[in-house]
Image: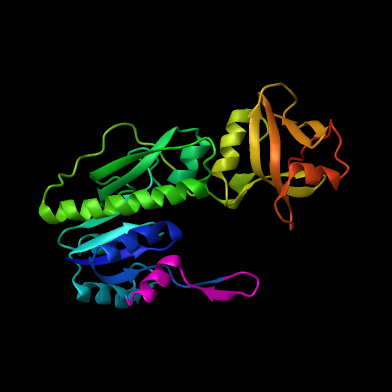
Amino acid sequence: MRIVFFGTPLFAVPSLKALIQAGEEISAVVTQPDRKKGRGHLLSQSPVKELAVENGIHVLQPEKMNDVAFLNELSSIKPELIAVVAYGKILTEEILRLPAMGCINVHASLLPKYRGAAPIAWAIINGEKKTGITTMLMDKGLDTGDILLQAELEISDEDTTETLSIRLSELGASLILKTIGGIRDGSLKPQKQSGEATYAPIIKKEDGLVNWSKTAAELSNFVRGMHPWPGAYCYLNGEMIKLIGVKSIAGSGMAGRIEKAHNGEFIAGTGSGLLSIVELQPQNKKVMPASAFLQGRNIKEGMYFDEA
C-alpha cells in the first residue's frame, strides 16, 4: 500500500520510524519548509525531514497546500493512504479526496475531547488525569472525523507537556501500525465521535503569563502544561522569570505576594493555597534552584510579583 506521510515535529518521528521499520511503502514524506532558527539564523530541517532523508525517502515541503506543483506531484504518486501526524497545516479537500483508502490522522487526545492544535498542553492545564491517542479518518472539519482506534494513557502529577508528548508519541506509533493493519485487512469499522466536544486552541507566547489569582493547584498544572513552550512566566522587580518547577502546598496568602523567601524556600500566595517555587529561570540565564535565585537578589517577604 503506497503511503504518503505528513508530519513535522519530534512528536511525529516515532510514527514514521515505526512505519519504516514495519516495511510499509512510504512513497513520500510531506513536511514543513526548512526554517531559520537561532541567533545565527541557520536553516533548520524538521525532525521528520531528517529521518526521511536518512532513510532515502522523497521529501516534499510546500509552502501552501494549494501549490499547483505540489498537488501535481502528490497526485502523480497515486497514494493509496495518507497518514498525518502533527503536520501543522490543514489539508485541503482536494488532498483529502486523493487516496483511495482515505486520510488518517494520529491525534493526541481521546476525541471528541481536545480537538485542535494543543491537546497535550490543555489536558495538563485543565488537570485531566488521563488522555490518549485517537486515530481517525480525516474530513474537512477540525478533528471531527470518524474514530478508528483509541488508546488511553494516564497523566502523572509530574508530567509536563514535554514528557507527556514523548510518551504519547510512542503510543501513537503503536496505534498507527494497528490502524493501518486494520484498514488493510478490513477489520476496522470507523465509529462516529460521541460525547461532548472540547477544544484545545493553539498556545501563544502571551498565554504563558501567570495569573496569581488562580488556585495553587491550577497554577501547578499551568506551569507543567506551559513547559517547555512558551513557559509559565511572571515578573519580579521588572525582571521576567520563568517558573520551571512548582508545588502546590497548604496555607493561605495574598495572590501574587511573596510569603516566604528564606532558608532556601520561595513561596508565593495565590487565589487559594500557596505555591512553592522550586526551580526557575531568570531572563537570559540558566535554570536554577529557587535557593540559588534568592541568594543573588534582595527578595523580601511581602513583595509582589508584577503584572507586567
Decide which of 93, 264 is in the foreground and name it: 264
User: In what quadrant of the picture does the C terminus appear?
Assistant: top right
Where's residue 282, x and y in %? 74, 51
Residue positioned 48% across, 49% down in the render = 202
Q: Is residue 59 above or below residue 252?
A: below
| Camera sees residue 141 | yes
- Residue at far left of view: 186
The question of residue 51 being in magenta is answered with yes
Quarter of the image containing the N terminus? Answer: bottom left
Return the x and y of residue 121 as percentages of the image width and height.
49, 44
Picture quadrant of residue 195:
top left
Q: Residue furthest top?
A: 251
In this view, the residue in front, 149 or 159, is 159
Q: Which contiguous range is marked in magenta?
A: 37-56
Residue 210 shows up from this direction: no
Task: Please give the name of the residue rendered at 39% of the width and 61% of the height, measured from the top-left corner.
Answer: 13
Q: Is residue 272 left or right of residue 157?
A: right
In depth, the one of 153 and 199 nearer the eye is 153
Q: Looking at the image, which residue is at 35% across and 67% down?
A: 65
User: Residue 144 occupies which quadrant of the picture?
Assistant: top left
Residue 92 located within the stretch drawn in magenta: no
- The colour style of the image is rainbow
- Residue at image coords 28%, 42%: 150
Residue 66 appears at what percent x and percent y?
Answer: 33, 69
* Position above or below: 217 against 153: above
Q: Is residue 42 toward the left or the right of residue 110 in the image?
A: right
Q: Quadrant of residue 27?
A: bottom left
Identify whether 223 is placed above or below 79. above
Note whether 289 is above or below 249 in the view shown.
below
Q: Position of residue 50 (x, y in %)?
A: 43, 71
